[in-house]
Amino acid sequence: TLSQSGPFTADDIVIRFHDSGQEPSFNDYIRQQIVRLKRLGKIRTSETYTAALKSFSSFMKGSDILFGELSSDLLMEYEAYLKNRGNSPNTISFYMRILKAVYNRAVENGLTGQRNLFKSVYTGVEKTLKRAIHLNDIRRIKRLDLSLKPHLDFARDMFLFCFYTRGMSFVDMAYLTEKNIMENRLIYHRRKTGKLINLPMQERALLVLKEYKDGNKPYLFPILSTLHKTEQQKLNRLHKVITKVNKSLKAIGKELHIPIKLTTYVARHSYATVLKRAGVATSIIS
């Protein structure tokens, strides 16, 4: 297969297909899309494609499949496989939509014909319960005595800092440096969208930063360091830390009997929800 011969492009697959007269591998084409996304700097999206490929390959027991072998029946079997593994409808749809996007791109590239294979499987999005807690719960998290559990302190600080900074994402927090704090204002570009954020720093947010202040380190929080030189190294480190933080937040939520499983996303969503419950207009919140 092409994946065994090093980097390749969509054109390489098309040329190989037409030259050989053989149908291309659907799995190889997904792998090529992952490489393409990484080259475009769309690391997060490439990870979702990798997750979908891993899931589909597990269903196929590691065997590649040609485009011509794809069928509605096979996709329905894959859907049943995912259901039996306990995946939610939205998770199933997540995988199916990625496979469908890859398939449609292959159709555009002339690698296969459009056979509307995904019409019999679920590709929608179900409404989920909003992940938000009340302001009183935020106060309880802040006041919780963790003197006997200091390993949970960092997770709580990340949760509170996220809330104090209007729902700042964990990735953006990880990349903060001294240059992002100017005259008690937080100024940074969102890594996901590139949008400029400029907001006043609450005193409580400044106190959190003070706990981790170290002029010898490049970042304000002990998440990334000079040891993480490549984007992949940084990405691996971020995944490791955020997994650990969310595990600690889950323990905090359990101790406080908070009905929602605490994650950094809960802090992000709670900020907007607290404002809404306080009567602030949606246009202002936006």
Image (cartoon, rainbow, N blue to C red):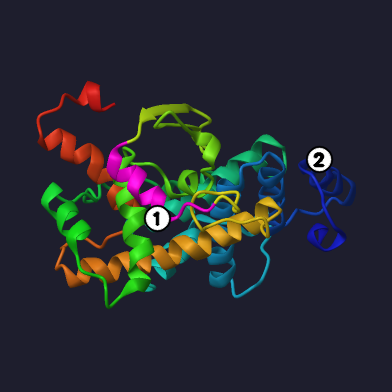
* Magenta-colored span: 202-214
Q: Position of residue 213 (x, y in %)?
A: 47, 51
Element under disc 2: helix
Which amino acid, mark 1? Glu
- Residue 236 visible in the current orientation: yes
Q: Nearer the viewer, residue 81 or 67?
A: 81
Element under disc 1: helix
**Residue at 36% across, 43% down:** 206
Neighbour class for label 2 at 10 Å: few (<14), some, many (≥20)?
A: few
Q: Nearer the viewer, residue 218 or 14?
A: 218
Q: Position of residue 208 (x, y in %)?
A: 35, 50
**Residue at 36% across, 69% down:** 247
Residue pointed to by mark 1: 211
Neighbour class for label 1 at 10 Å: few (<14), some, many (≥20)?
A: few
Disc 2 or 1, which lies upstream in sequence?
A: 2
**Residue most toward the front?**
215
Residue pointed to by mark 2: 11
Eyeballing the image, is 181 above or below 251? above
Q: Nearer the viewer, residue 40 or 165?
A: 165
**Is residue 263 shown left or right of residue 189?**
left
**Residue most toward the bottom?**
148
Which amino acid, mark 2? Asp
Name the chief secondary structure element in magenta: helix
Q: Is residue 45 magenta?
A: no
**Is residue 269 shown left or right of residue 238?**
left
**Is residue 199 shown left or right of residue 6?**
left
**Residue at 40% across, 58% down:** 92
**Residue at 46% across, 46% down:** 173
Q: Position of residue 75 (x, y in %)?
A: 49, 59
Q: Position of residue 134 (x, y in %)?
A: 13, 49
**Residue most toward the right?**
19
Badge nearest the viewer, 2 or 1: 1
